[in-house]
Image (cartoon, rainbow, N blue to C red):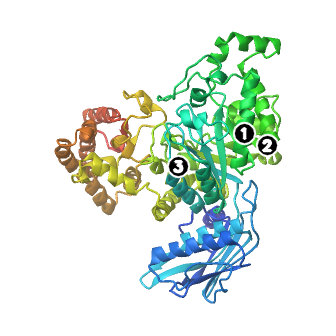
């Protein structure tokens, strides 16, 4: 008996440690989870008299942020608040939230973002060192909003919160497929909602140069197809982000990935031109010539202008995936290497990087680059962004280089939220010492844009990036995957109020795919399929380019099927205890999939674009029929024959074949069901 009590106490302690040291807990929808939470058993009830006051009253940035939060609360509740907006002349509130902060924060790496939030029955108090910390606390307050039959309320709670990592970023590739300013802004709002603080804009690529350059105008005139951000638009983006406590770091990828640059200035290439903007995807040969002084005169002029335009202390030079083919073929480059004792292309790129570092340092910028810029002779005042993985990040940290992790956060590869969530910049088993761990600044989710457009990009960023944001902010021991999914779906739906289209565009795309017919049969299918993972889509029969359609079923399908996940959880529970209520729910889902196929066939007759999914729909019906056999058989004691199992496992293998570059997300669960049956 004593051992049972000790185990119970241990379980309780472990459960509480996930959320901090608080002994008082209740289910909540906060994401990221704060460092410490302590709920009490009361509510602050909302009504139209709710107001917000700020002490001191002279911070326009916080006034504007708090006003937006007030409007979002009003929008969710339908309450007609008497307070319209906050200014420095706003009088202190008599009923509601009081915000106090000590100073205006700088939008820079390492700024204080901590806050405390206390909600009592009659008042709310938010305190922070900086106004940026208050921004983070206000987002927590929004997530605490709840409702019952009496109306809306905030639960009484005490929260002490701070971020685990100081660099919590999202990289958006606006070069391969150009993304307009409204896309950037709505995703900045999404980042702020989950406490991310770095927007990394990938602004140059083989397929396009995306920012106006007044000193070298041919860059945007010849390298962009007319799709680029003007200086004024860049300033607008930076202002918009900074007002939300988010840094904007530009990336100009060199010496490779440079076709669009060399379209405008072919004389700087390692082999003679002419060059044209690349329309295909992949790694291409065009590369800057690092051995001629004209290259560095060019970059001095370029980075001078960009350093004045972008206010962040960091500037990203890319540096990845230079295949070196042009360098190998250029006799003058080979001669330069021999005369200067440069033994290979890695050393030559290190020479190039150091020359760029001198230029950036002259303009008071710190260099960031992908793994490839990490060379033994590089100065240690650079930041390594690791796409290769933990080994590379650990090695650079052990040698005293600051780094951020992106390996494991490539959201364009359509992997599940769980995969990203359990990936950690500093895992529990890290070989790094406490001092070495300080070199790991955090991480970035990366949204590469080969296979997305403005129409689909939000669905590839959200909601999975909410899970990544929690990994970057919350304590490392916050790792409850099931609870993460529960909270993520709730926060995802709330983020629609920011204008994000990750939910709304789904049915819009299905309507187009069905020629505005009844979308239910298509939706029933697409709800349980996912795009093929990693880079498989490029290898499955379709040659994608910058101008091929990104409007098919594979584009509408979400990276992770929540329907398939729920089905899998229900099957696991049923296999454990044979609960009749769960069996009834499973039968309903299975019958729906069985009946769906005939309805799907009807809409394909006037929607040829979805005919590529016909075999997938048929396989779903066969698997659903198999599931019904197993469910019904398990309740009446049926013994299955070996021949039956062999046949059904062949069906599973057939169902694993992708169609339309999608895969059936239910396959693992059906395979588990088949293998669970009692055999004769």
- From the image, tell me which residue sits under label 3: 418
Q: Quadrant of the C terminus?
A: top left
Give the percent coordinates (x, y) of residue 606. Answer: 18, 43
- From the image, tell me which residue sits under label 1: 303
Give the percent coordinates (x, y) of residue 421. Answer: 57, 50
On the question of residue 21 being in view, the answer is no
Q: Is residue 522 left or right of residue 389?
A: left
The numbered mark at residue 370 is none
240 and 187: which is toward the camera: 240
Name above or below for residue 350 compared with residue 196.
Answer: above
Q: Is residue 210 left or right of residue 294?
A: left
Mark 1, other Cα within 10 Å: few <14 / some 14–19 / many ≥20: many
Could you give the CA–CA distance between mark 1 and mark 2, rounded to whole angstroms? 8 Å
The answer to which of marks 3 and 1 sits earlier in the sequence is 1
Could you give the CA–CA distance between mark 3 and mark 1, rounded to whole angstroms? 39 Å
Residue drawn at 22 percent across, 54 percent down: 518
Q: Badges 3 and 1: C-beta atoms under 8 Å apart?
A: no
Mark 2, other Cα within 10 Å: few <14 / some 14–19 / many ≥20: some
Q: Badges 1 and 2: C-beta atoms under 8 Å apart?
A: yes
Q: Secondary structure under badge 2?
A: loop
- From the image, tell me which residue sits under label 2: 363
Name above or below for residue 232 compared with residue 534.
Answer: below
Residue drawn at 60 percent across, 42 percent down: 212
Could you give the CA–CA distance between mark 2 and mark 3, rounded to whole angstroms? 41 Å
The answer to which of marks 2 and 3 sits earlier in the sequence is 2
Residue drawn at 36 percent across, 55 percent down: 574
Give the percent coordinates (x, y) of residue 325. Answer: 62, 17
Give the percent coordinates (x, y) of residue 640. Answer: 26, 41
């Amino acid at each position: 008996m004593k051992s049972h009590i000790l185990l119970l106490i241990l379980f309780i302690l472990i459960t509480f440690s996930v959320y901090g040291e608080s002994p008082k807990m209740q289910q909540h929808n906060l994401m990221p989870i704060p460092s410490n939470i302590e709920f009490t058993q009361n509510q602050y009830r909302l009504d139209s008299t709710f107001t917000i006051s700020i002490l001191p009253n002279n911070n326009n940035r916080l006034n504007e942020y708090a006003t937006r939060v007030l409007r979002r609360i009003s929008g969710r509740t339908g309450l007609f608040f008497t307070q319209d907006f906050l200014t420095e002349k706003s009088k202190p509130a008599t009923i509601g939230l009081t915000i106090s902060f000590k100073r205006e924060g700088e939008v820079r790496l390492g700024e204080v973002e901590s806050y405390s939030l206390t909600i009592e029955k009659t008042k709310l108090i938010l305190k922070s060192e900086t106004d940026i910390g208050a921004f983070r606390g206000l987002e927590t307050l929004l997530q605490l909003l709840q409702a019952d039959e009496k109306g809306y309320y905030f639960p009484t709670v005490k929260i002490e919160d701070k971020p685990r990592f100081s660099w919590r970023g999202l990289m958006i590739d606006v070069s391969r497929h150009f993304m307009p300013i409204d896309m950037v802004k709505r995703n900045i709002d999404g980042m702020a909602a989950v406490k991310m603080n770095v927007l990394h804009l990938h602004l140059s690529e083989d397929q396009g140069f995306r920012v106006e350059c007044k000193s070298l105008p041919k860059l945007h005139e010849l390298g962009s197809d007319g799709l680029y951000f003007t200086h004024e638009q860049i300033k607008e983006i930076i202002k918009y982000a900074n007002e939300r406590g988010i840094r904007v770091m530009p990336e100009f990828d060199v010496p490779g990935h440079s076709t669009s640059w060399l379209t405008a200035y072919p004389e700087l290439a390692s082999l003679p031109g002419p060059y044209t903007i690349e329309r295909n995807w992949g790694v291409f040969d065009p590369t800057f010539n690092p051995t001629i002084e004209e290259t560095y005169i060019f970059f001095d002029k370029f980075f001078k202008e960009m350093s004045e335009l972008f206010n962040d202390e960091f500037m990203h030079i890319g540096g990845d995936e230079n295949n070196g083919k042009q360098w190998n073929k250029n006799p003058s480059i080979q001669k330069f290497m021999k005369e200067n004792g440069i033994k290979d292309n890695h050393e030559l790129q290190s020479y190039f990087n150091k020359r760029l570092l001198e230029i950036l340092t002259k303009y008071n910028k710190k260099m960031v680059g992908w793994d490839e810029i990490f060379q033994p002779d590089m100065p240690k005042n650079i930041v390594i962004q690791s796409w290769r993985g933990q080994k590379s990040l650990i090695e650079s940290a052990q040698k005293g280089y600051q780094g951020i992790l992106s390996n494991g956060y490539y959201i364009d590869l359509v992997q599940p939220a769980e995969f990203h969530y359990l990936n950690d910049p500093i895992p529990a088993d890290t070989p790094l010492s406490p001092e070495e761990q300080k070199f790991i600044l955090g991480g970035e989710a990366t949204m590469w844009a080969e296979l997305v457009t403005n129409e689909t990009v939000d669905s590839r960023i959200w909601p999975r990036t909410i899970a990544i944001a929690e990994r970057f902010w919350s304590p490392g021991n916050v790792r409850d995957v099931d609870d993460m999914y529960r909270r993520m779906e709730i926060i995802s739906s709330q983020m629609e109020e920011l204008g994000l289209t990750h939910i709304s565009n789904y049915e819009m795309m299905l309507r187009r795919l069905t020629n505005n017919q009844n979308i239910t049969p298509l939706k029933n299918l697409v709800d349980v399929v996912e795009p093929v993972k990693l880079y498989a889509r490029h290898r499955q029969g379709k040659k994608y380019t910058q101008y091929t359609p990104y409007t098919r079923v594979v584009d509408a399908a979400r990276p992770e099927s929540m329907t398939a996940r729920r089905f899998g959880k229900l099957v696991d529970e049923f296999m454990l205890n044979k609960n009749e209520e769960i069996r009834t729910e499973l039968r309903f889902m299975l019958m729906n999939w069985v009946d769906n196929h005939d309805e799907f066939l009807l809409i394909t007759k006037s929607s040829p674009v979805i005919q590529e999914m016909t075999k997938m729909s048929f396989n779903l019906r066969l698997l659903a029929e198999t599931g019904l056999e197993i469910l019904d058989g398990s309740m009446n004691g049926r013994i299955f024959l070996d021949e039956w199992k062999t046949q059904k496992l062949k069906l599973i293998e057939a169902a694993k074949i992708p169609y339309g570059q999608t895969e059936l997300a239910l396959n693992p669960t059906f395979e588990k069901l088949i293998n669970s049956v009692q055999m004769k």
